Amino acid sequence: MDRYIELWVESLPQLLLAAAQVTIPLTIIAFVLSLVIGLFSTAARNLGRFNPLNWLATTYVWFFRGTPLLVQLFLVFYGLPRVGITLDTWSAAIIALSLNTGAYVAETFRSAYASIPRGQFEAARTLNFTRAQTLRHVVIPQATRIALPPLGNDLIDLVKGTSLVSVISMVDLFQSGKQVAARTFEPLAMYLEVAAIYLVIFTLLSIGQQYLEKRTSRYVRTANA
């Protein structure tokens, strides 16, 4: 056990550096882009059944939700060079992670929008709200509260999904742990430490998610109110 503790203390700076330089920035960039992609995809899917943008957005969501992230990473990093598009590891990882998470975010936005009762829109029309006013004062506040829990889950899944970028030679938290394990011949100790760091990130995100849910639900009346 003393050997494990010594290894954990010795390798912790390297693992935290990998998390700070790769895992966390990659997560933030990909999640912000996925929100934009999800928003545009949701808008496109509400343009009408026979609109080409609707078909494109629907096909995009179908493909990226129906195929593994690992396959998507290989397609972007190893497959695109076959058609003349060569990307560095950061660009390939950001594109694959953003497109993958964006498909799930699009479904989150779509379900949140669909869950708002039609009567809310009719009430807005009786008040002579424009479409923009209806979105701002009626749709977005309610949809945001509904979408927060699944969006938090999408973010947590994205953090864990970044561990797959090691297959395209990015030295993230997981790959850094693999390197230390290969050098010290102590895979159990190192992967336990990597798992512990992921658990810390997960716990912090969960606390933040719960805080945001409480903040956005402050003015929601309960059934007994």
Image: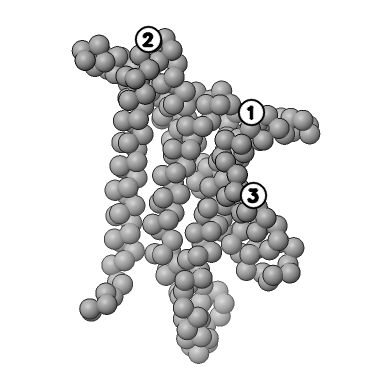
Q: Position of residue 78 (x, y in %)?
A: 68, 29
| x 60%, y 44%: residue | 67
Which of the two discs, 2 and 3, labels the residue nearer the N terminus? 3
Amino acid at pointer 2: Thr
Q: Give the number of marks.
A: 3
**SS at badge 2:** helix
Name the residue carrying label 3: 63
Name the residue carrying label 1: 88
**Quick check: 77 above or below 122?**
above
- How dense is the environment of label 1, judged by Cα within 10 Å: few (below 14), some, or many (20 and up)? few
Which of the two discs, 1 and 2, labels the residue nearer the N terminus? 1
Q: Nearer the viewer, residue 154 or 220?
A: 154
Name the residue carrying label 2: 184
Please indicate, yes or no, whether residue 124 appears anywhere in the rendered image: no
Q: Give the alpha-carbon distance from disc 2 to disc 3, as whole Å.
A: 41 Å
Q: Nearer the viewer, residue 212 or 128?
A: 212
Q: Seen in the image, is 198 located left or right of residue 116?
A: left
**SS at badge 1:** loop
